[in-house]
Amino acid sequence: MPEHPWRTVIALLIGAVAFGITPLALAHLWALYFSPKKPGPEKNAIYECGLESKGDAWIQFDPAYYLYAIIFLIFDVEAIFLLPFAVAFTGLSMGAAIAMLVFLLLLVEGLIWAWQKGLLTWA
Amino acid sequence: MNGSMTVLRILPEIIFTLTGVAIMLIDPVMPKQASRKPLGWLAAFGALAALIASLYQYSLPVGTAYFGVVQTDAFSVFFHVLISGIILVSALVVLDAVHPDTESLGELFALMSFGAVGMLLMTSGVELLLVFIGLEISSISTYILAGFRRKTAKSPESALKYFLLGSFATAFFLYGIALTYGATGTTRITDIAAGLATSHALPIAVVGLAFIVIGLAFKVSAAPFHLWTPDVYEGAPSPIVGLMSTAPKAAAFAVLLRIAYEAFPQLQNHWMPLLWILAAVSMTIGNLGALRQKNVKRMLAYSSIAHAGYLLVAFTVLSTDGVAAASFYAVAYAVMNVGIFAVISHAGGYEDRLTLIEDYKGLAYRSPLLGGVMAFFLLSLIGIPFTGGFFGKFYVFAAAIHSGMIWLAIIGLLNSGIAVFYYLRVLTATYTKPMDSSPVLNVPRVSAPLCLAMALTVAVTLVLGIIPGRVLSMARHAAETFPVFSTQQTPVPGTASAVMAAINTKAR
Amino acid sequence: MVPVSYYLILSAILFSIGVGAFLIKRNIITIFMSIELMLNAVNLSFVAFANYWNQINHQFSGQIFVFFVMVVAAAEAAVGLAIIIALFRTRKTLNVDQVDLMKL
């Protein structure tokens, strides 16, 4: 009987979950028997080398941040075309290399535009 | 493959790209206070060069380039000329309507050029991937253009509505392509017909075709996928509305024609009723909706829905006549719509000072030239003889009656009757003497670019209405590029034309 | 081997969830996310079909499609976010029910 392709996946999944849960469960059992709960202000404080949190995490970000984010998003994703280009580079014809060059120049053109427009300086 | 020939096949696209890039590079280095109008002239000259290049493409032999992805034939060149012309006139109209200190004017002209690249690629692409990219280039540019007056309340709202519904439609279009690819194993429009003949999954192809039609129906604002149109047209700057109600629609219609007749001729029993319903519903909803509008731009939005309906009537005529009538109507509609929006954007300005029909009272007295041109285009939209609108409607309905679509023709003619009412309302307002108490309508002086734009559109509308023969023969020539209709050449086994010939003999 | 129909059914379900969320949700960002979900559902279809056709006639142009869809989706996201920011600056809301200056 051929092995079902998902059997290894399921076995690995169970193994991975067990690997995480077993030590946690053991630690919990250990704590139940050997360390009774005695909470106090010292003990409830956050971990000693961290900082006390100030204010709310849900603050408004500066809109300038979004400008960077949008520009970054474009350039980040356009880089997807560079990967197949790099893989196939040795077998490419001249025309294909020129086409890629045009693509890159257009990207650079966008960057120059954003730079000249002052979108890269934090206002 | 001849190297220089391949570049010539996308020459108008290259010209538009270079224009847009040049504008984007020049704009930031110009002094901040300097007028951006020279950039507008640059865009206009780029469009003119692209128009000439498109006309030149007529002399190229039919063929494909870049691994068979783009095809220049009479059909794509026909739409190239149309779209380049629309961009040229729109650039002139924008030049007239804006102040020199309008915000980010350089980007506006650059986006117009880039959008044109997408529209041109849509019409010449024979690979669905390229058609999709072209559709997105044109859509994304128009989303931004719709929201260009970003400090106002309405403009970003219209951009948002356009963007959300437009991307929704894109997703449908894309899913349709995916299903078609699954059923036929190819995304090349010219190979799909052959793939369908051997396909084991025709139902998937039918669903895919339906999704493609839904996606494109959104783009051409055919009812019941028209809901975004009035809001977007109301909120967007008027000069831009003239552009985006014509050029992207013409391109989308071209794609629909190519996909329907070149990729899915076997499934015509499936798509024909679909388009029949779309046509009937669009005509009716468009005209009834326009009747109760007080805002001129909203009224024209509904009128554009109705015109999309008339154009779809031509789709149901399964012959060269149908495609030719559709192409001709696309030209006639585009020219008169760009023309009327030229008048509106001059009278109302980039800031949209005039919105309601009453606001146009006395326009003809303030400026006889503007009033006259407005009246001319309204008459053409109604379909009065000696205008392009008349012959457009005439060919569409004549073709429909010839092929036995009597009911659709009757619905269309009844709707043309309804349309007279709302166009006449604007026309009478234009020629009503304003009361002494009413605020004085301030119409700026007519500038040279506007004169040029109006002269061009009026001239073309008159040519279409008086001597339509030449344009019609070009449209017919365009229609004959589809292998479905070509009877001269002997079909090669396994190709689309062979399949079609087999279907035709079976039908006989 | 997992049959191709499994992927297609998953893709159809994801697409339907996207359509449903687009129609029901009221927050613009959430609506936007549902569009992205629809596009990615289509991508799944493309990959599944490309795999299927690759085995039959070594045609896998569907995979190329996925690349372009991803890039186009990113470009669309950038423009969409910019439009949303412009809208938020004038309206101070992200609820589509309150973006209703223009109505039928």
Image: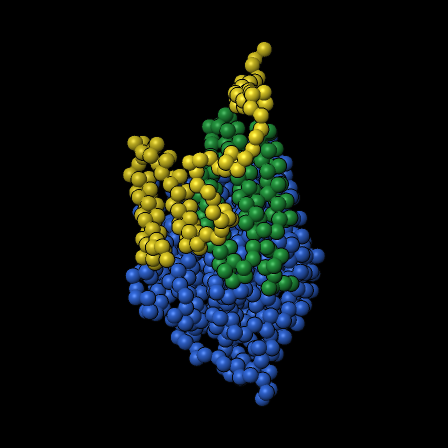
Chain colours: A yellow, B blue, C green
Residue B343 in picture, x, y percent from top left: 50, 73
Quadrant showing the N terminus of chain B:
top left
The number of numbered badges drawn on the structure is 0
Instruction: Out of B483 and A29, give the one closest to the viewer.
Output: A29
Query: Where residue B311 sits: x, y (%)?
Result: 59, 58
Q: Nearer the viewer, residue B234 or B66?
A: B234
Q: Position of residue A76 (x, y in %)?
A: 39, 43
Which residue is found at the position 55% from the left and 24% from the top? A35
Q: Is residue B248 left or right of residue B357?
A: left
Do we see residue B376 in this rendering?
A: no
In the picture provided, is B390 more to the left or to the right than B190? right
Quadrant housing the C terminus of chain B: top right
- Most extreme residue toward the bottom is B436
Q: Residue at x 58, y 88 (%)?
A: B436
- Looking at the image, can residue B30 be seen? yes
Residue C64, given in percent of the width and then of the height, sits at 45, 37
Q: Answer left or right for A93 relative to B217.
A: left
Kindly identify the residue that appears in the image at 49 percent across and 58 percent down: C86
Residue depicted at x 54% and y 61%: C91
* B343 up-or-down from A92: above or below: below
Depth order, front residue of B237/B241: B237
B2 vs B148: above or below: above
Where B61 sits versus C100, above or below?
above
